Amino acid sequence: MANEIKISPSILSADFSCLGKEIEAITKAGADYIHVDVMDGHFVPNLTIGPEVIKDIRKSSTKTFDVHLMIEPVDPLLESFADAGSDIITFHPEAEKNPKEIIKKIKNLGCKSGLSLNPSTNENVLEDLIMDLDLILVMTVVPGFGGQSFMEDQLIKIKKIREMINESGKNIDLEVDGGINFETAPKVIEAGANVLVAGTATFSGGPDMYEKNIKTLRGL
C-alpha cells in the first residue's frame, strides 16, 4: 500500500520569497503533486494566490498541479485557472448551485475534476457526482484557518468514501488535507486515503530535508 501513496506538498508552507526554487526542490525530492490552495477571503477567511501566480510557477515543475479552489463563485474563474496550468481543479459543492455542471466544465477545459468536503459536509453529497469525479478531497481541518489540529472524527468519513470509491469501480484519488504530519499520515492511509496534502510536514527543515520528509509521510 505504501508505494501507492502520493504526496501533494501544499505550497502555502513554502518560502514565498523563492517560490519557484521551493517547487523545484520538492519536485526533485519526489513530490507526486503540487498542491495549490486558492482562497478568496470570502468563501474562507484567508486570501492567497490567483491564476497569474500559478502561471508563473508552472514552469518550475512538470508535476501534476493539484489546485484547490476555496472560492465562491467558482464558475467565472475556471477558465483562468485551467489556462494557468492547473491539472486537477477541486472545488466545494457549497460554492455553486449546480456542482454537476461545474465538474463538466472543468473536464471540458481539459482538467481533472475534484470535489472537496469540509468537515461539516456529509459524504452523501457525492452520491450523484462520484461517477464524474477524478479526485475527492476530505478536509480534516476547517479551511481558511491556520494552526488547527487534525480532526480524528473525519477518519470515519474517509473510510466511508473509500468504500464508495471501491463500489464505483472508478480510479478516483482520495485526498486528505489538514493537520497531516508524521503521526496522522498513517491514520489516514489506513482509513483509505491515497493522496496526502502536507504543508509544514513537507517543508520543515529546509530543502535538504524534503526528500526524507516525503518518504516518511509515505510510510517508507
Image (cartoon, rainbow, N blue to C red):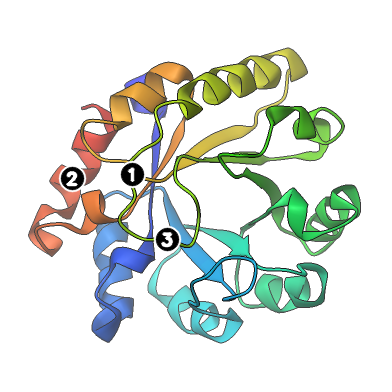
- Mark 3 or mark 1, earlier in chain: 3
Quarter of the image for residue 27 reads bottom left
Within 10 angstroms of label 2, few (less than 14), some, or many (20 or more) residues?
A: many
Q: Residue at x 44, y 78 (%)?
A: 57
Which residue is disc 1 drawn over? 179
* Three-letter residue code for mark 3: Phe
- Residue 85, position as x, y percentages in the image: 60, 71
| Residue 29 visible in the displayed image | no
Within 10 angstroms of label 1, few (less than 14), some, or many (20 or more) residues?
A: many
Which residue is disc 3 drawn over? 145
Q: Which of marks 2 and 1 is in front?
A: 1
Q: In this view, does 85 lie above or below 202?
A: below
Q: Is mark 1 on a helix, strand or loop?
A: loop
| Cα–Cα gap, marks 3 and 1 | 11 Å
Q: Which residue is drawn at 36% across and 67% down?
A: 12
Q: Which of 51 and 161 is in front in this view?
A: 161
Q: Is mark 2 on a helix, strand or loop?
A: helix
- Residue 103, position as x, y percentages in the image: 81, 51
Within 10 angstroms of label 3, few (less than 14), some, or many (20 or more) residues?
A: few
Task: Tell me if label 2 and label 3 are in contact, CB under 8 Å.
Answer: no
Which residue is disc 2 drawn over? 213
- The quarter of the rendered structure image containing the N terminus is top left
* Three-letter residue code for mark 2: Asn
- Mark 2 or mark 1, earlier in chain: 1
Q: Nearer the viewer, mark 2 or mark 3?
A: 3
